[in-house]
Image (cartoon, grey):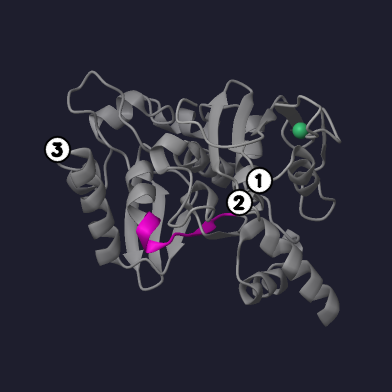
Amino acid sequence: MPRGHLHTLARQRQHYTGERFARAAKHLLMQPWAGPLPDASPHQADLEFEVLLRLGRHHMTLGHGWRHGDGPFNLSWLTPHTDAIELGVHPLALPDVAANLMPRLSPDTTGQPTGVLGLRVSHSGAGVELTRLGLPGVVRLPGIRERQWQQALAVARDDAGDTSPPVWQTHQDTLHSQEITYGPRYGTGSSRRLAATGRHPSGIVRLGSALLRRHQIFRTAPPVAGIDLWFNPGQIELEWFAGPTHDDITSALLDPVFGLSGSTSRRGCCRPSTSCYGVKLWCASAPHATVNLRRQSSGWSDSQ
Ligand SMILES: [Zn+2]
């Protein structure tokens, strides 16, 4: 690849991934077959959709990392691979990220547990690795040491007043009964079949993974004042306050090189005289799924 072309691609990729230039360039060279911004395999996308739903809710994570306007979804950068994703987490954002991803049981047996059910951690010199018991898909947090991870979880548990023994300690290699009861992929007695089919239709899962892999487009100047994401059947609701216009976001998401092949319900809105709260976006690789881009033109409201 000519050096000038590589530099241009790496700079463009940084806008989507938040990686440092050298890292973006290295991965462009390492995985030329995967394209400038690789798609996730179906199983990997399934895990990433779960991650997106946990980190996207602003009331869970405050929507940001360690500094106002920095790190949408509490993440500083990401590196996408076909069968894995690496997520950069600042140490100050780690308690929120760890606590929202790891499964937490409800205090009694009647409530639904939270977090990614079946998720367990392993540690290596490279950092933290998160996988679901018996299911493919990997999330890596490079550079996070075992002690840092444990401290972050202890801080989060203290904050939440959670004194029950954590499931990832009591059940390192097996599922807890609450995970089996509530885990849509595990389900009593039919884990293998459910693991193959999953809970969510493949279109919305693919769209969610594609968004996670591009979400650093919300790290903008001026910064968004808040970002929130939730899920309705067939539709991902993505709302932000101030910062980029609809056209800024849809142009990035439909970019011919780094974006999705798709279309949008509206262009050229976000003028003071127009009302344009929700703009929908579809992509060809995610049938029967839309993302509703909800832009609030100013401020952040705690009532949202
Ligand atoms: Zn608009």
- Residue 164 bears which disc, if any? 3
Question: Quadrant of the rendered structure where residue 89 is?
Answer: bottom left
Give the residues in magenta. 83-93
Distance of label 1 from label 3 (alpha carbons): 41 Å
Indicate which label's residue lies in the foreground, 1 or 3: 1
Q: Say if disc 1 is inside 8 Å of ligand 1.
A: no
Q: Are marks 1 and 2 in contact (CB under 8 Å)?
A: yes
Q: Seen in the image, is 149 located left or right of residue 295?
A: left
Mark before the other along the chain sequence, 3 or 2: 3
Q: Amino acid at mark 1?
A: Gly
Q: Which residue is mark 2?
A: 223
How many neighbours does mark 2 have within 10 angstroms: few (below 14), some (14-19), or many (20 or more)? some
Picture coordinates of residue 225, whole percent (x, y)? 56, 44
Furthest residue to the top? 110
Furthest residue to the front? 273
Q: Seen in the image, is 138 located left or right of residue 176?
A: right
Q: Which residue is mark 1?
A: 243
Disc 3 secondary structure class: loop
Q: Amino acid at mark 2?
A: Pro
Residue 110's place in the image compared with 224, above or below, is above
Residue at the image position 52 percent from the left and 30 percent from the top: 198
In the rendered view of the protein, which quadrant contains the N terminus? bottom right
Residue 139 in sight from this viewpoint: yes
